[in-house]
Amino acid sequence: MKNLFVSILVVAALAPFAVHSQQSSGTLAGLLSKQGLAGAKLERRSGNHLFVPVSINNRRGALMIDTGSPNTVIDVNSVNTFGLTVEKTGSNVGGLFGRSWERFGTSKVKSLAMGNCTVTNVPVAIADFSGMNPEHRAAATGSHLADSKALAHINGVLGAREMVKFGMIIDCTRQMLYVNPNGRNPGVSQSLASFLAGHGFTRIPIRLNANDHFDVEGALNGHPTRFILDTGSANTLIDTQVAVKSGTGVTALAGYGAGGAGGLTEGINRTGVKELAIGNFKLANAEVVVAHVSKDVLLSNSAAE
């Protein structure tokens, strides 16, 4: 049977990168501290997004935790705020729905501080987040993030490349980001896997594919598939054609749309999936949203001029 390809946009646990922790005694935090990892507090804002307050070149801001982005990206409207010098490139990136392509630049962040950890000389891409920032008069700070009624300003996203390089771990329950300033360490991953196994967690292998996306084997109503792990979206999203092939019905959500950094929105539908499997972990009656997703985006294609 031909595999289906879908995108899963919120994941409760990404091992070894995102995990739930036990609330009692802070044992996960203690384990990671002994392994030399530093912690940064996360904020859940703008629906179901996780933000990390940061200091970029000694200027405060906020980055969305986005495992679905291969690179760390800074909003073009925050370039001057952070004192960045932008180099133009000949590459374009596409929005989620494939109707707009945007040329992006590159830069380098001299210092990026998260919690009590600072990393230096971080390469970043530059793209326009205006569609996600109705007001971009100032950089986001801790006080902005504390206002749950306001849409948190987004200065950019923290992407997969830095997560891999610095062996980052996302604790979804306690809303913490752990960073290894010395880089990823297989010993830390093994210790973490042993710890989680002892606390009843199911281990699901993930891979960093050739397009620098995390993905995992799964199934949708019994149809084999691969899921992209993307914490940059608030919901689990399935491409319309994939939903039809898997026998999934939809109920329209009038007036609701999904959007991305490109500023375009797409009408979405809601549906219940009888069985959603991630590895050998199965979820019954899972609720997802359905929309047309560009094939180029699903396959991580880009265009160069």
Image (tube, rainbow, N blue to C red):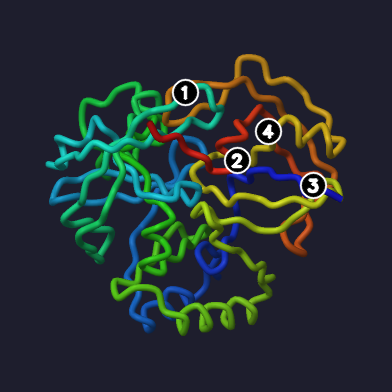
* Comes first in the chain, label 1 or label 4: 1
Q: Nearer the viewer, mark 1 or mark 3?
A: 1
- The amino acid at mark 3 is Leu
Q: Nearer the viewer, mark 3 or mark 2?
A: 2
Q: Residue furthest front?
A: 305
Q: Which mark is residue 298?
A: 2
- The amino acid at mark 4 is Val
Q: The residue tagged with tag 3: helix, strand or loop?
A: strand
Q: Which residue is mark 1?
A: 100
* Comes first in the chain, label 3 or label 2: 3
The residue under the point 42% across, 31% down is 261
In this picture, residue 130 sits left or right of residue 257 = left
* Comes first in the chain, label 1 or label 3: 1
- The amino acid at mark 2 is Leu
Is residue 100 or residue 230 the one in the foreground? Answer: 100
Q: Which mark is residue 289?
A: 4
Quarter of the C terminus within the rendering: top left
Q: Nearer the viewer, mark 2 or mark 4?
A: 2
Residue 237: image x %, image y %?
Answer: 65, 38
Q: Tag 1: Cα neighbours inside 10 Å, few (<14), some, or many (≥20)? A: few
Q: Is residue 120 above or below residue 259?
A: below
